[in-house]
Amino acid sequence: MTFICNKTIYEQVYDHFCEDIIKGTYKVDDRIPSIREFAVKLQVNPNTVVKAFKLLSFKKIIYKRRGLGYFVSSAACEQIITVRLKTFLIYSLPSIFREMNLLGITMEDFEREWLKYNNK
């Protein structure tokens, strides 16, 4: 995992795990790797994973079964998508539209360029 400097590592571990849920790597009621396994996989300190798991538990994305480990909650994917969509609409999209306006790019230009670079 490549880390960025403007966000804490545990938040990046949290984001990474949420992306795995959205991509379908972990599904509802799947057991997820242990804290130690996750730390080894991402090459981070186990205490960092503990903080990420606490945040995931607090947001009800994962839940713990005593003696069995952590599991993905039934509403995890929907919750993650709802929060990420809101964040995208409030923070990312205005910046994109501002840049498009500055560069004189229309929606048609954007669509044409997007298709050119993303149709492989």
Image (cartoon, helix red, strand yellow):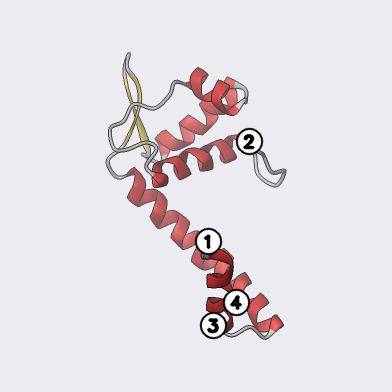
The one nearer the camera, 4 or 104, is 104
Q: Which mark is residue 9?
A: 2
Question: As drawn, is 46 to the left or to the right of 18?
Answer: right
Mark with earlier residue (1, 3): 3
Q: Which mark is residue 107?
A: 3
Mark 4 burial class by Cα count in 10 Å: few <14, some 14-19, many 20+? some
Residue most extreme to the top? 67
Looking at the picture, which amino acid does disc 2 mark? Ile
CA distance separating discs 4 and 2 = 30 Å
CA distance separating discs 1 and 4 = 25 Å
User: Is label 1 in contact with label 4 (beta carbons under 8 Å)?
Assistant: no
Give me the residue at 58% from left, 34% from top.
Answer: 10
**The N terminus appears in which quarter of the rendering?**
top right
Mark 2 burial class by Cα count in 10 Å: few <14, some 14-19, many 20+? some
Looking at the picture, which amino acid does disc 3 mark? Met
Nearer the viewer's eye, disc 1 or disc 4?
1
Mark with earlier residue (4, 2): 2
Q: Which mark is residue 120?
A: 1
Mark with earlier residue (3, 2): 2
Per the image, the residue denoted by label 4 is: 97
CA distance separating discs 3 and 4 = 9 Å
Disc 2 on helix, strand or loop?
A: helix
Disc 1 on helix, strand or loop?
A: loop
Give me the residue at 53% from left, 61% from top.
Answer: 120
Give me the residue at 44% from left, 55% from top.
Answer: 83
CA distance separating discs 1 and 3 = 21 Å
User: Is label 2 in contact with label 1 (beta carbons under 8 Å)?
Assistant: no
